[in-house]
Structures are given as structure tokens and as C-alpha cells.
């Protein structure tokens, strides 16, 4: 039986039970959502022991290196010491704008009490429901934080977000993540593939690259169902302003993974020179990354920003 140490107390972990179950059974208040490793609402940090690969799936390499893990997916095999993440939502912000861009996408802009970069992600907390989102805005020109929230009829967080009004308070964590335009050569072509609201971090990243004078081509592929494209006029304006920026809208129908892979094969048969950023739902991105790798993309040149599918 493994032992879980949390806030200087030891808790026995019954075989087969997750760390989240062990702590909740002790009536410890912790945020959580899907309980299946998707929404990342339960994120914690492990300071001693190994939480295991399954419990770190979908986290950035920086988060993994720092011991962050998802206790709902962690069935420990050794003793663990765990703590609440310093990512806790402790910064107070105010809603500046709320726009329903399509039936499925809500854009929120809020004041920024924290430093951030486009492509990083942060946790938002509304009425103790917490979710992680990627940042689409570029400081200092855009001094606000912008996120795109996928709205689903059963989405607990998106439902709360749709009720927000300008001036309402919202809690945030600090911003983290390495899906950012750092240390990229201005001469290297960039291929950005965003599935649904995976457009958000890539829109931010493309704007930042252009502002930094990126010279090589930046191809942004937005892949989603035909009625779900959004930010079209903003993206087309960017393409008019910067000849090296190209927008491609890829409508998806029955089999998104295969359709994106086929599109890549037809239009970018050689990916050796490209730096790739993929953002969207995790299983789809992993499959697309595999196809890209087969087409010659170098593993270290592929960056994945995986999203939750629970909203
Ligand atoms: S509750 Fe753990 S990832 Fe959703």
C-alpha cells in the first residue's frame, strides 16, 4: 500500500485507488472536474516520488519536469509527497469584454494582473469551477488576456463563462507553458495547425512572430467543422498586412484525424524544414504529430499544446 503525504499528513492509498480519491475521501477540498485526466482541473505537484507517465499526459514538458501531475489519473505504485500547485487561482481580474463569436466559441478578455505570453496557458476559476485555457493576446499592444472557450450544452465551465458580464470578477493562476515564440529563427518556416479553439494559442503565436519580424512563411491551418470557423476577418486582415502569413481553413467532416493527415500529405509532403505547432484535443494531435513525423518533421521541432475536451 502506498502512502500519500499531503500538507504534513500521511494518508494510506488503497491499492487501485487514485491519489484524488484518497484525498477526497479524507474530506480534503480539492478542485476537480472530469476525473479522467482530461480537464486538468485537479492539477497538483509531486515533490517526492514518481506520479507516473499516465498522470502527466497532456501537461507541458515544463510542467512535467516540475512534477505537476493529475491526481485523478494517478494510481501510485510508490509513496508520494504532493502539494497544491503554485498555479492556484489566486489573482483577481475583471472581465473587459465577452463576445460569442459563434454558437460554439466564446471569447473572453480580462484585465491582466500577471505577466504572460501568447501561447502560454492559465487556469481560470469561476465559482470554484476551474479550467485551463491558452492565451491568444500579445502584450504589450494587447494589455488584456484573451481566451477562446469552446461552449457545449453540457459544459459546466463554459455555461458559467457565458453568464459573465463586463466588470465581473474572475480568478486566475499565473501563466505557464512553452507553446511560445521563443528562440525561433526568423528564417525558419512555421506550420501552425489548430483544431477548433486550438486556434487561440496559434493566433497569438503568429501575431507575436510577425511583430518580431519573422521573415519565413507562417502557414496557419484552422481545422474544424464547416460552420465553426471563427476570427476569419482578423486572420484575413493579418494575411493582407503580412505577405508571409497564410491562412488555410480546413473543413472537417467524418474523420478529423485522417482528414488533417491527408491534407498535410497533399500540401506539405516534405516537413523537414518546418517548425510545427499543433493545438487542440490530445488524441487527435498525437495522431497528427505521428503523421507529420512520418513526413519528415523532426521530433524536436513539433510542439503540442493539448486541450481538454471537457468544458
Ligand atoms: S479532474 Fe483530473 S483531469 Fe479532470
Image: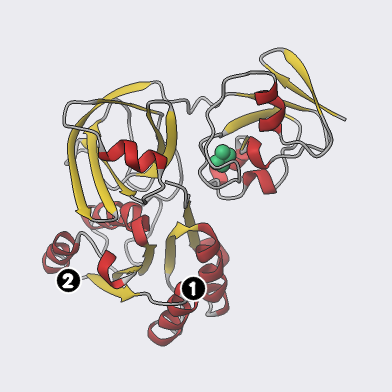
Most foreground residue, 239 or 31:
31
When asked about the image quadrant of residue 172, the answer is top left
Q: Is residue 169 above or below residue 294?
A: above
Q: Secondary structure at mark 2?
A: loop
**Relative to residue 98, is residue 43 drawn left or right?**
right
**Relative to residue 280, is residue 57 drawn left or right?**
right
Q: How is the image coloured?
A: secondary structure
- The residue depicted at 69 percent of the width and 23 percent of the height is 25
- The numbered mark, 1 or 2, whose residue comes first in the sequence reads 2
Most foreground residue, 244 or 88:
88
Determine if residue 63 is in view.
no
- The residue depicted at 47 percent of the width and 78 percent of the height is 261
The residue tagged 2 is 243
The image quadrant where one finds the N terminus is: top right
**Labels 1 and 2 touching (C-beta < 8 A):** no
Query: Residues under labels 1 and 2: Cα distance?
Result: 29 Å
Determine if residue 41 is in view.
yes
Q: Position of residue 95 (x, y in %)?
A: 21, 31
- The residue depicted at 43 percent of the width and 40 percent of the height is 132
Label 2: how many residues lie within 10 Å, few (<14), some (14-19) or many (20+)?
few
Q: Position of residue 88 (x, y in %)?
A: 47, 25
Q: Position of residue 155 (x, y in %)?
A: 40, 45
| The image quadrant in which ligand 1 is located | top right
Label 1: how many residues lie within 10 Å, few (<14), some (14-19) or many (20+)?
some
**Relative to residue 60, is residue 115 drawn left or right?**
left
- Tell me if the residue at label 2 has its CB under 8 Å from ligand 1: no
- The residue depicted at 57 percent of the width and 78 percent of the height is 294
Q: Residue pushed farthest right? A: 1
**Relative to residue 309, is residue 143 drawn left or right?**
left
The residue tagged 1 is 257
Q: Is residue 225 above or below residue 31?
A: below
Q: Residue pushed farthest top? A: 8
Amino acid at each position: 500500500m502506498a502512502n500519500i503525504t499531503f500538507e504534513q499528513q500521511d494518508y494510506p492509498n488503497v491499492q487501485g485507488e487514485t491519489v484524488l480519491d484518497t484525498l477526497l475521501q479524507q474530506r480534503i477540498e480539492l478542485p476537480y472536474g472530469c476525473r479522467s485526466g482530461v480537464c486538468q482541473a485537479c492539477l497538483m505537484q509531486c515533490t517526492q516520488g514518481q506520479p507516473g507517465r499516465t498522470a502527466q499526459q497532456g501537461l507541458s514538458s515544463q510542467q512535467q519536469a516540475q512534477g505537476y501531475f493529475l491526481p485523478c489519473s494517478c494510481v501510485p505504485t510508490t509513496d508520494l509527497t504532493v502539494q497544491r500547485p503554485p498555479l492556484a487561482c489566486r489573482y483577481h481580474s475583471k472581465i473587459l469584454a465577452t463576445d460569442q463569436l459563434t454558437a460554439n466559441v466564446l471569447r473572453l478578455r480580462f484585465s491582466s494582473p500577471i505577466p504572460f505570453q501568447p501561447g502560454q496557458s492559465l487556469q481560470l476559476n469561476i465559482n470554484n469551477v476551474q479550467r485551463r485555457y491558452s492565451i491568444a493576446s500579445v502584450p504589450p499592444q494587447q494589455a488584456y488576456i484573451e481566451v477562446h472557450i469552446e461552449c457545449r450544452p453540457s459544459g459546466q465551465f463554459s455555461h458559467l463563462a457565458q453568464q459573465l458580464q463586463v466588470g465581473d470578477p474572475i480568478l486566475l493562476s499565473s501563466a505557464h507553458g512553452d507553446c511560445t515564440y521563443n528562440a525561433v529563427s526568423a528564417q525558419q518556416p512555421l506550420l501552425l495547425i489548430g483544431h477548433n479553439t486550438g486556434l487561440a494559442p496559434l493566433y497569438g503565436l503568429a501575431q507575436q512572430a510577425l511583430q518580431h519580424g519573422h521573415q519565413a512563411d507562417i502557414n496557419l491551418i484552422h481545422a474544424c467543422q464547416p460552420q465553426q470557423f471563427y476570427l476569419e476577418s482578423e486572420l484575413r486582415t493579418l494575411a493582407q498586412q503580412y505577405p508571409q502569413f497564410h491562412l488555410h481553413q480546413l473543413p472537417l467532416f467524418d474523420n478529423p484525424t485522417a482528414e488533417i493527415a491527408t491534407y498535410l500529405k497533399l500540401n506539405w509532403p516534405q516537413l523537414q524544414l518546418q517548425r510545427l505547432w499543433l493545438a487542440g484535443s490530445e488524441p487527435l494531435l498525437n495522431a497528427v504529430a505521428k503523421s507529420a513525423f512520418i513526413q519528415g518533421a523532426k521530433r524536436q521541432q513539433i510542439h503540442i499544446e493539448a486541450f481538454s475536451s471537457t468544458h
